[in-house]
Image (cartoon, helix red, strand yellow):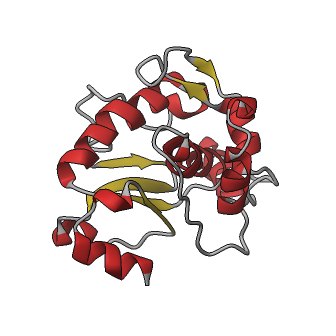
Amino acid sequence: MTPVSENTKTLSLRLIAVLRPPPKITISEWAEKERVISSEETSSPGPWFSDRAPYTVGIMDAISDMKVEKVVIVTGAQMGKTNAGIMNPIGYYITHDPCPIMVVQPTITMGKTFSGKRLAPMIRDTPCLRGKIAAEKSRSPDNKILEKNFPGGYIVIAGANSAPSLKSRPVRILLFDEVDEAPITWQVKVTL
């Protein structure tokens, strides 16, 4: 019998990991188990507890339900919709079901702020995400302000005010934030 090379073993293990179906876990279960809220985001940083905002569980579980095509969240300000509808889904998909993800912010400027003030701290402070995307200050081409690569996918952050940032992006997960702040003509198209 011919011995198997280390390269073949490594390739086989990678193929098994890629072909393995995602675990039967919802986004809310992932958040309870893995998510860490950053000190930049709250006065009480630490593990995510859905008990603090129990209404977010339904939002997260709807997003992770393969039979649901569209989830619309209408709430007041500072009610946890960005965490439930954007941040936790991003963390879940990076961890358990890697794929191309687009987050649309009202403007490119807001997208840059989102990337630096929300996304980068979540990646830094959530242990299961930390090693999957290069550190914010690294010179890695896999970590730009508006595009972050991870094994099996990427996150691109677009602005509703910038047609070029929205074009030619094959994505499986599309997340919109602060739709009411986007250009009026764009809001009409999104709601159709």
**Viewer-nearest residue: 82 or 154:** 82
Considering only vertical position in the picture, is 51 above or below 187? above
In the displayed image of the protein, which residue is found farthest to the front?
76
95 lies left or right of 119: right
Q: Residue furthest bottom?
A: 192
In the image, taking residue 99 as reference, residue 180 lies left or right, namely left
Residue at 22% x, 67% y is 183
Q: Quadrant of the C terminus?
A: bottom left
Res. 171 image quadrant:
bottom left
Which residue is more in the foreground, 116 or 155?
116
The location of residue 1, given as percent across then percent down, is 82, 53
Report the residue at 22% width, 32% height from top.
Answer: 139
Residue 3: in sight, yes or no? no
The answer to which of 64 and 9 lies nearer the viewer is: 64
* Relative image position of residue 51 (x, y in whole percent): 75, 31
Quadrant of residue 73 in the image? bottom right
Residue drawn at (21%, 55%) of the image? 107
Q: Is residue 130 above or below residue 70?
A: above
Marker count (numbered) = 0
Locate residue 41, reporting x and y percent. 44, 25
Q: Nearer the viewer, residue 98 or 86?
A: 86
Q: Is residue 123 visible?
A: yes
Q: Position of residue 95 (x, y in %)?
A: 62, 44
Does residue 53 lie above or below 156 as drawn? above
At 50% across and 47% down in the image, what residue appears? 76
